[in-house]
Amino acid sequence: MLNPFKKWLGNLEKKDAPISPSIDLANVPTHVAIIMDGNGRWAKQRGLPRVAGHHSGMKNVKKITIAANDIGVKVLTMYAFSTENWKRPKEEVEFLMKLPQEFFPMEIAELVEKNVRIRMTGWKESLPDHTLSAIEDAIERTKHNTGLILNFALNYGGRKEILAGIQDMVQDVQAGTFHMEDLDEETFSSYMLTEDLPDPDLLIRTSGELRLSNFLLWQLAYSELWFTDAYWPEFTEDIFYQAIAEYQRRARRYGGI
Ligand code: V07
């Protein structure tokens, strides 16, 4: 690019919200996954209860969804609750399970206006009825939207997903509807909960932890990983765009040369 500001200026002409001059809008990751960590620590640092951190974290979800939508990200997967999180204190779990029903009345109008489609990856069975109906309502009300897919990973665990996929596959083999000769990475992917989504191009984890914590184990095989010390409630559009710019600077070679 001869004039690095050309895209930036082009941007300003098309949109009123300035994005970032360092982002190449022609090379934006299709699928970004985020581990929204550090809500409890953010709260503790301020002398607040952990749940205040979760609440603040919830309010950050829409902001980053809109920032992602503005640059053309197609899928945004947010890790909201893992299969391990049930082990937390009962009061905290109960509070977390109320967040979906609180999120939608507050955010749905703007998300619908931006053409965002809501989805969920995880096991619905063990969620409380009030949580599940809030989620299903949002999925239903946005199912015809064609913009960014906001995919909540909720009651999700990567190893459990892989084992469940193997179980389903073995059942299909026994029923004669799947043949072992056809097993390869692509057919196995169709047994994952994310069957119809592309693999994430970029994983972001907040709060300084450098682990995958059982998130999208199969799907993250070739993803770029990006970490920040910022706690999720203080993660801004600017930090998000820094991650995108860094993603664009890295050569992605898929283990080849
Ligand atoms: C949760 C807020 C974000 C920080 C991480 C943990 C706490 C949004 C939702 C949500 C989930 C499904 C849905 C609509 C909204 C949510 C949980 C926790 C359990 F359809 N934030 N958020 N769900 N946190």
Image (cartoon, rainbow, N blue to C red):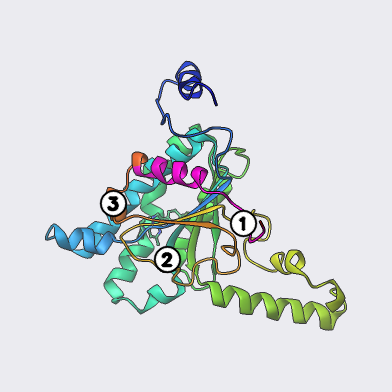
The residue nearer to you, when weighing 166 against 25, is: 25
List x then y, in percent, for residue 64.
Answer: 40, 43
Q: Quadrant of residue 241?
A: top left
Amino acid type for the residue under numbered disc 2? Phe
Residue at which label 3 appears: 233
Residue at which label 1 appears: 199
Are the two marked residues, 2 and 1, in contact with CB atoms closer than 8 angstroms? Answer: no
Q: Is residue 225 left or right of residue 106?
A: right
List x then y, in percent, for residue 233.
Answer: 28, 51
Q: Quadrant of residue 146?
A: top right
Amino acid type for the residue under numbered disc 1? Asp
Q: Furthest-front residue in view?
A: 257
Q: How many angstroms separate mark 3 from mark 2 (CA)?
A: 16 Å
Are the two marked residues, 1 and 3, in contact with CB atoms closer than 8 angstroms? Answer: no
Q: Is residue 215 left or right of residue 40?
A: right
Q: Which residues are magenta?
A: 239-256
* Ligand 1 closer than 8 Å to label 1 CB: no
* Ligand 1 closer than 8 Å to label 2 CB: yes
The residue nearer to you, when weighing 193 against 209, is: 209
Quadrant showing the C terminus: bottom right
Q: Is residue 211 left or right of residue 148?
A: left
Q: Furthest-top residue in view?
A: 13
Circle 1 packing at 10 Å, graded few (<14), some (14-19), many (20+), is many
Number of callouts in the render?
3
List x then y, in percent, for residue 255.
Answer: 63, 61
Q: Quadrant of ligand 1?
A: bottom left
**Secondary-structure class at tag 1:** loop
Amino acid type for the residue under numbered disc 3? Pro
Residue at which label 2 appears: 81
Q: Earlier in the sequence, mark 3 or mark 2?
A: 2
Does 104 lie within the magenta span?
no
Q: Furthest-bottom residue in view?
A: 174
